[in-house]
């Protein structure tokens, strides 16, 4: 059941920021602080935080913050993944433009001003921005997004779309088995509707976030979402990614990405612990993909038989 913290609505809301969150209270507080200190008037934008069943005190923190900021609206729901969390907030958004970011990022003070300016002066359906990280803090166990020239998957840590088109598409697809590719699904469909431009001035900092070895080692399982993406629209998959998911996983990832990771681990040669972790992860991913090949091949054959 969704619980909305009801606040006074803004008649002049031009842009709505949708921020899903789950058990990242410390990171969330930094991102929320950045969003509340945007260079434009708080009267023209709203922040919709969708709490995806957090158990670390996030809910209580958000309720407290919403009492002191009229343009902050909070929604509480059971854990269902980022796609569902975004859709909950989307149904309540008032702005004509919907801006997306994540709870482990920090937006630039002019982030919203830049988005508004681009939509006001160009005929766009969407934007993706410049996302950067701190390369000095990157290790084999960190997660970060570095998108400095644009990517056709359009990561939702730094993206904005016209609300009317998001509604027409039905929001984010909640059937993806892992939180992966639901943003590509929306991004590809948007690019078929109109122009989705890359904006270098639309800046978001994505600090390296350290995870446990076991969690990082399981990363290859998210590739199962490739088959959901392919099944939805094979033509768009071939246009924007690859001929089919098997080729993408076992050529682009298994060969090219794994070779890149193997080579990149060498930079840690003066840090024995990091280089050991790096090579261990790469080899684990390598053999994990080999192990998954029969099941992935079976999924692909089943899809081919139905399309």
Image (cartoon, helix red, strand yellow):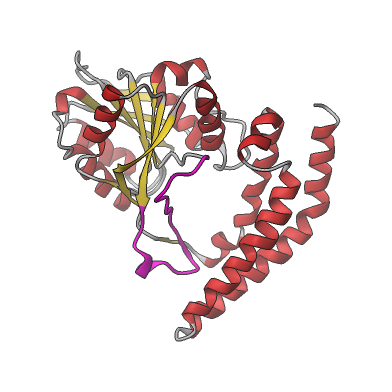
Residue at 22 percent across and 26 percent down: it is 45
Quadrant placement of the C terminus: top right
Residue at 45 percent across and 27 percent down: it is 195
Q: Would you identify the image quadrant in which residue 209 lies?
A: bottom left
Q: Nearer the viewer, residue 55 or 9?
A: 9
Q: Is residue 195 above or below residue 204?
A: above
Q: Would you identify the image quadrant in which residue 231 lies?
A: top right
Picture coordinates of residue 184 (x, y %)?
A: 54, 37
Picture coordinates of residue 249 (x, y %)?
A: 70, 51
Q: Report the span colored magenta.
A: 132-152
Report whether 126 appears left or right of 292.
left
Q: Is residue 111 above or below residue 14?
A: below
Quadrant placement of the N terminus: top left
Q: Nearer the viewer, residue 135 or 281?
A: 135
Report whether 219 appears left or right of 246.
left
Is residue 24 shown in magenta? Answer: no
Is residue 136 shown in magenta? Answer: yes
Q: Would you identify the image quadrant in which residue 158 lies?
A: top left
**Residue at the outermost front position:** 122
Q: Is residue 7 above or below residue 140?
A: above
Residue at 40 percent across and 47 percent down: it is 23
Q: Is residue 104 visible?
A: no
The number of numbered discs placed on residues in the rendered structure image is 0
Report whether 166 appears left or right of 46.
right
Q: Is residue 267 above or below residue 32?
A: below
Residue at 79 percent across and 40 percent down: it is 300
Picture coordinates of residue 130 (x, y %)?
A: 35, 46
Report whether 57 appears left or right of 244.
left
Q: Is residue 98 visible?
A: yes
**Residue at the outermost top position:** 11
Q: Main secondary structure of the magenta part?
A: loop
Picture coordinates of residue 243 (x, y %)?
A: 73, 41
């Amino acid at each position: 059941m969704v619980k909305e913290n009801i606040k006074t609505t803004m008649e002049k809301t031009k842009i709505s920021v949708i921020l899903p969150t789950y058990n990242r209270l410390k990171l969330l507080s930094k991102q929320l602080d950045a969003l509340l200190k945007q260079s434009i008037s708080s009267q023209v934008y709203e922040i919709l935080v969708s709490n995806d069943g957090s158990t670390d005190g996030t809910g209580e923190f958000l309720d407290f913050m919403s009492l002191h900021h009229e343009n902050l609206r909070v929604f509480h729901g059971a854990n269902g993944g980022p796609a569902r969390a975004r859709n909950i907030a989307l149904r309540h958004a008032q702005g004509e433009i919907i801006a997306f970011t994540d709870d482990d990022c920090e937006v630039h003070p002019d982030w919203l001003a830049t988005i508004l300016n681009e939509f006001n002066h160009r005929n766009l359906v969407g934007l993706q921005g410049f996302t950067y990280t701190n390369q000095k803090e990157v290790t084999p166990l960190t997660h970060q997004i570095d998108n400095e020239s644009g990517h056709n998957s359009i990561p939702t840590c730094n993206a904005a779309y016209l609300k009317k088109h998001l509604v027409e598409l039905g929001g984010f697809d909640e059937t993806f088995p892992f939180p992966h590719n639901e943003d590509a699904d929306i991004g590809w469909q948007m690019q078929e509707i109109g122009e989705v431009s890359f904006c270098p001035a639309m800046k978001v900092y994505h600090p390296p976030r350290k995870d446990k070895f076991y969690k990082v080692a399981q990363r290859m399982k998210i590739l199962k979402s490739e088959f959901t993406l392919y099944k939805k629209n094979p033509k768009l998959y071939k246009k924007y990614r690859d001929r089919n998911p098997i080729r993408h996983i076992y050529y682009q990832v298994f060969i090219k990405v794994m070779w890149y990771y193997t080579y990149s681990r060498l930079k840690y040669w003066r840090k024995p612990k990091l280089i050991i972790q790096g090579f261990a992860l790469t080899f684990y991913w390598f053999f994990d993909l080999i192990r998954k090949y029969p099941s992935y091949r079976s999924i692909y054959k089943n899809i081919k038989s139905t399309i």
